[in-house]
Amino acid sequence: MKIYWSKYNYKFYSEKFGNLLYNSFTNSFINIDDIINEIIELENDPEKFYNLSNALQKILLEMEVITENSPEDFLNSLKFKSLIRRSSQNSKSNFVLVPTLDCNFRCTYCFEQNAQNNKKVYMNKEVEDVIIKNITNEHKKNNTNIGITWYGGEPLMAFETIERISTSLNKQQVPYNASMLSNGYLLNSEIINKLEKFNINFLQITIDGDCKTHNKRRPHETNSDSYEKIIENLKSLHEKTFKVNVSLRVNLDQTNKSKFNEIEYELLKMYPNYKVDFAIIRNVPINSSCKNISNCINKKEKIDFHIQQYKKFGNENLKYYPTLNGIGDCGATGLYSWIIGPEGELYKCWNDVGEDKRIIGNIIDNKFSNVQLLNRYVVGVDPTEDPKCKECFCLPICGGGCPYNRMVNKYENKKTDNCIIQKGNKALGKFLEIQYDINLKKKILKEIEV
């Protein structure tokens, strides 16, 4: 049987840790100082693998540094896993429910603000009943757990809809777990007390800075000081005994990225049980949330920001290490993942919500009106069919990137950079060096027995 030096191997030198070897297919790496000569020989002649000790052979096979799979076999494996993910209905069916596009905030960077201003519609009982029927039938037919995400607009502005749908599912004993993306302004004690009943066990709430910064970047439609109300609501939630996982999200651009660590420190001091995360305000075609190009953070600046978080602030909670995203993990390409708008309209991608031309169909008549767009998302943006992605070292860890970006790049001639920030030898080495340091501290590294 022919063996190969994997195309997904990356050998690099760290001034701090010496020679390291990384494999993107298994997303694993080890220190190879003690076997550097053997590794160099293997790269040139994989057959020398059989001269190595059994212990070393085992490690290299587990990492798939040396493999019996040809490049085509690896690609077929990725494609097969993608098909399984996109067509699987065995574990959970996911529904993103948008009870309204209306919002009580007027965030300066919100990519949905035009849709919200033009479509202040709320879900009616007819749509609610059809959603309940579909979710119930989905569970009964396939015996699956249901995942629900409440999205908007601001979903708490339509809490009556959330209450009616959740209560009905509870009565019919449909097992489901729910999450919600909210600005937190309406998260009062009455609603907080109902979260557990409605199986809402995860909340993402955005806080963009201190009082002055947050109120400027995320102005409420009438209240000039919404920050204090959100802080008080979070305090009430934090004091509850039932467990709700909360992620406090900080949206960053040039105007507030230097303050992230101060924001994180202050929020964790107030709410030590919560997680603080950040997102770079994106500059993507059509629904760009980076309205002022001078405030956008480019790719090099994203890389520098991440690296600085560890080297300057010792932040170990970020995803420095590339993760196995998996092709087909995004609901936009999945057969059984849908976003349902307030009028029953169906979307495949969060970025499309509120855009009439992105509506694929409607849950009321159960018909597809835009099969072309559906086909583009589900099969048209498959990275295993993309000549550049097929040859790319990063494909196993990026999964081809965002399907929405792939779709508009391919079919609408946009030119969005859709690659992960770790791509490129210099950047990848820096990120892997950080993760190696973290793993060393946590004592979770493999040791090679020569």
Image (cartoon, helix red, strand yellow):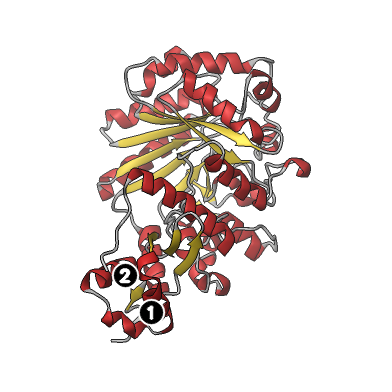
For numbered disc 1, what is the local secondary structure? helix
Residue in front for this viewpoint, 378 or 136: 378
Is 50 situated left or right of 186 in this image? Answer: left
Q: Return the residue at label 1.
A: 42
Q: Quadrant of residue 68?
A: bottom left
Q: Residue at x 35, y 78 (%)?
A: 69
Residue 158, placed above or below residue 405: above
Is 47 situated left or right of 397 in this image? Answer: left
Q: Residues within 10 Å of mark 2 (few under 14, many from 20)?
A: some
| First in sequence: mark 2 vs mark 1 | 1
Is 276 situated left or right of 421 in this image? Answer: left
Numbered badge on residue 187: none
Q: Residue at x 47, y 55 (%)?
A: 432
Percent position of residue 53, x then y = 24, 74
**What amino acid does circle 2 point to?**
Leu
Residue in front for this viewpoint, 396 or 123: 396
**What amino acid does circle 1 point to?**
Leu
Q: Quadrant of residue 211?
A: top right
Q: Return the residue at label 2.
A: 60
Mark 2 touches mark 1? (CB < 8 Å): yes
**Residue 426 at least partly seen:** yes
Residue 60, placed above or below residue 446: below
For numbered disc 2, what is the local secondary structure? helix
